[in-house]
């Protein structure tokens, strides 16, 4: 996807259900760099709503995420972004073949104790911070 001056680059976070990890990543990207990047999330098999433990852990860090059904990943959605980050799985290489992608091996917060969810949240925050730094560097190089 070609960047147009003034347009925010789009980053898509994908997990299994778009109910925890992907939404946490999108919330942090929006908070850290929403002026430069548009954060999107989707899932392979979307859930009916946000995982409560994910929402609670973000709330502890001062972030809120709107509840609602997860979004289904589509080939069109994947092709319309500048970067794809998968969480806990490898995306079929035929999906959005030309879009740069990263794989983050982050476990699902589903069914975990709150202390474990906090560790997942803090890992996500650090990974998103690093992603923003890389994306900012790439933008300067362009």
Image (cartoon, rainbow, N blue to C red):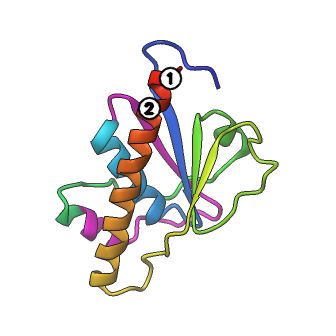
Please indicate, yes or no, whether residue 105 appears anywhere in the rendered image.
yes
Of 18 and 93, which appears nearest the observer? 93
Tag 1 residue: 141
For label 2, the SS is helix
Residue 125 numbered tag: none
Q: Residue at x 77, y 42 (%)?
A: 97
State whether residue 68 is above or below residue 142. Answer: below
Q: Residue at x 50, y 23 (%)?
A: 141
105 lies left or right of 111? right
State whether residue 25 is above or below residue 3. Answer: below
> Residue 11: percent from the left, percent from the top?
51, 40
Q: Which residues are magenta?
A: 34-58
76 in magenta: no
Q: Residue at x 53, y 20 (%)?
A: 142
Tag 2 residue: 137
In which image quadrant can residue 37 be found? Answer: top left
Q: Using a 10 Å C-alpha cutoff, classify the residue at mark 2 as few (fewer than 14 neighbours), some (14 to 19) or many (20 or more).
A: few
Q: Residue at x 39, y 61 (%)?
A: 124
Of 52 and 106, which appears nearest the observer? 106
> Residue 25: percent from the left, percent from the top?
41, 55
Of 16 and 49, which appears nearest the observer? 16
> Residue 15: percent from the left, percent from the top?
56, 62
Q: Residue furthest right?
A: 94
51 in magenta: yes
CB within 8 Å, label 1 to label 2: yes
State whether residue 99 is above or below residue 93. Answer: above
Q: CA distance from mark 1 to mark 2?
A: 6 Å
For label 1, the SS is helix
């Amino acid at each position: 996807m070609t960047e147009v001056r003034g347009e925010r680059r789009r980053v898509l976070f994908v997990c299994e259900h778009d109910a925890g990890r992907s939404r946490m990543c999108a919330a942090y990207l929006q908070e850290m760099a929403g002026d430069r990047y548009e954060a999107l999330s989707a899932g392979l098999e979307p859930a009916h709503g946000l995982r409560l433990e994910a929402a609670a852990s973000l709330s502890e860090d001062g972030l809120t995420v709107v509840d609602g059904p997860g979004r289904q990943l589509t080939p069109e959605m994947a092709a319309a972004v500048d970067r794809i980050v998968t969480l806990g799985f490898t995306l079929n290489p035929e999906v959005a073949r030309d879009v740069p992608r990263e794989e983050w091996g982050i476990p699902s917060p589903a069914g975990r104790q709150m202390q474990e969810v906090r560790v997942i949240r803090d890992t996500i925050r650090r990974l998103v911070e690093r992603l923003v730094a890389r994306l900012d560097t790439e933008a300067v190089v362009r």
